[in-house]
Image: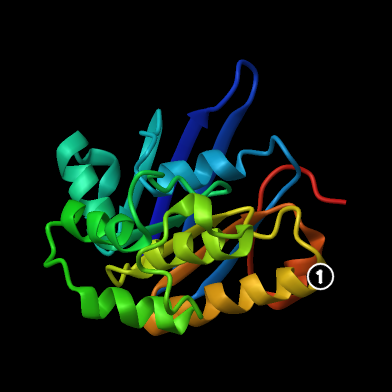
């Protein structure tokens, strides 16, 4: 599902992310570990096609995304890659429903309210279709962001520090939601974190930088 070959990318003035070879199969759940500054977010952005590697290849579902041009990469991302950023990045002037309809539109997929309602229901967000982001709690915002990420049934689901600043109970809840939604889409899940609490919850780990 994900195949990285000879990947190199400089992400600050002195540090280069180097990943000779890595593969993640369909439906696997991976934890991307490393201290702050080890390149976790950079790698997620490369996997999402938000950055182009200086050297190497990245293939997702048989498509070499590192060779796609901008518009083609945007279309591929919208249809095949779900991203949960550290911040929600929802459009404040749109309702929850319209933020999710936009995700369908950008993927050139039918705008299906039934699908939107089904995903929101799975995440315990019934009744929030008409609310705007400013009317939601932080927990609700995070779940709407997850709903947007899985709405188009992605083949890859990426999450950047989803448990940062959460207490233990909410940390466990977010991990459960991510795993459940990835399983529902049969998506490969990759979570980047430096949160040591989540290590025991994942069999597959990719470690960047020095670990204690």
Instruction: Give me the residue at 38% from left, 45% from top.
Output: 91
Image-based side of 60 in relation to 72, left or right:
right
SS state under label 1: helix
- Is 63 above or below relative to 201? above
Residue 108: image quadrant is bottom left
Image-based side of 195 in relation to 118, left or right:
right
Residue 33: image quadrant is bottom right
Label 1 crowd bin: few (<14), some (14–19), many (20+), radius 10 Å: few
Q: Position of residue 128 (x, y in %)?
A: 43, 70
By what rule are the colours in the image chosen? rainbow
Q: Is residue 201 visible?
A: yes
Image-based side of 22 in relation to 59, left or right:
right
Q: Position of residue 159 (x, y in %)?
A: 53, 57
**115 or 73, which lies in front?**
115
Instruction: Give me the residue at 19% from left, 51% from top.
Output: 106
- Is 167 above or below relative to 125? above
Instruction: Give me the residue at 20% from left, 41% from top.
Output: 68
**2 or 90, which lies in front?**
90
- Is 98 above or below relative to 24? above
**194 or 165, which lies in front?**
165
Label 1, on which residue?
168
């Amino acid at each position: 599902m994900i195949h990285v070959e000879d990947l190199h990318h400089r992400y600050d003035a002195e540090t280069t992310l180097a990943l000779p070879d890595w593969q993640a199969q369909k439906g696997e759940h991976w934890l991307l570990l490393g201290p702050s500054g080890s390149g976790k977010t950079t790698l997620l952005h490369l996997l999402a096609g938000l950055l182009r590697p200086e050297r190497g290849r990245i293939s997702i579902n048989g498509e070499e995304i590192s060779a796609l041009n901008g518009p083609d990469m945007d279309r591929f991302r919208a249809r095949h890659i779900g991203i949960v950023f550290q911040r929600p990045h929802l459009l404040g002037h749109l309702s929850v429903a319209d933020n999710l309809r936009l995700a369908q539109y950008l993927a050139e997929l039918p705008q299906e309210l039934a699908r939107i309602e089904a995903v929101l229901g799975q995440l315990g967000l019934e009744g929030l279709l008409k609310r705007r982001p400013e009317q939601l709690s932080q927990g609700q915002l995070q779940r709407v962001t997850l709903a947007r990420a899985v709405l188009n049934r992605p083949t890859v689901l990426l999450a950047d520090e989803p448990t940062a600043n959460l207490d233990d109970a909410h940390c466990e809840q977010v991990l459960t939601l991510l795993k459940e939604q990835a399983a529902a889409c049969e998506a490969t899940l990759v979570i980047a974190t430096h949160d040591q609490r989540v290590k025991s919850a994942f069999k597959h780990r990719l470690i960047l930088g020095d670990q204690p």
